[in-house]
Image: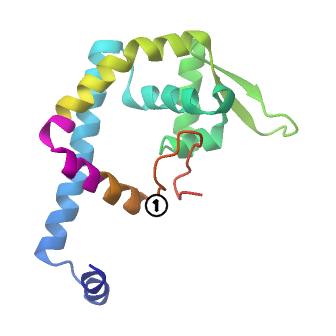
Amino acid sequence: MMENRLRAATDERLSPEEAALFDAFIGAAVTVQRNVDADLMYERNRSLSEYQTLRRLAEAPDKRLRMNELAAAAFLSLSRMSRIVEKLEQQGLVRREQAEGDRRGWNAILTEAGTEWLRRSECAYASSVRRHVLDNLDNETVSVLTAAARRIAHLPGPRHDRIFSVNGQ
């Protein structure tokens, strides 16, 4: 694998196999995101980004994260995350408070209503992910793809007590 990576790094163009992998990877990611998003909108009246925001908060210590950490954990821009949190706050699922000791920083905090909505939505989310991804793969392929995706995204292995930034730090 290292030899292939070194060869590819010196070539100006992608090989047909490399281009096919990249196109398939991007196509799969976009298709899955769109399909799961559509399912969640239909079944739970929430976008995938909103679901992921609530889920990241539920996994965080004290169900709270600084806005920039939440954006990084959900792979969204800070401005996009701000709009999502504002919408969720208006619906009582999240609340914001100023970060202690930092006038410019804000925390997003999952409310009880947000926790309850997330609990009621887990089955719809799981069903959609299974239908659009997992049902198409065997266990070995899931393991290989998970490891490859983490490596590509620079994410460490699973640790449920930590929220990860985009660059894995």
Under mark 1, the amino acid is His
Residue at the farthest front position: 140
Q: Tag 1's secondary structure?
A: loop
Report if residue 95 lies within the magenta region: no
**Residue 133: which quarter of the image?**
top left
Q: Which residue is mark 1?
A: 154
* Residue 135 percent across, percent down from the top left: 15, 35
Residue at the spot 55% in from the left edge and 31% down from the top edge: 59
The count of marks equals 1
Residue at the (54%, 15%) spot, across then down: 114
- Expressed as whole percent of the image width and height from the top left, the position of residue 87 reads 54, 20
Image check: 28 left or right of 90?
left
- Front-lying residue, 93 or 122: 122
Q: Which residues are magenta?
A: 134-145
Quadrant occupied by the C terminus: bottom right
Point out residue 4 in the picture as x, y percentages from the top left corner: 24, 83
Label 1, residues with CA under 10 Å away: few <14, some 14-19, many ≥20: some
The residue sitting at 31% across, 87% down in the picture is: 6
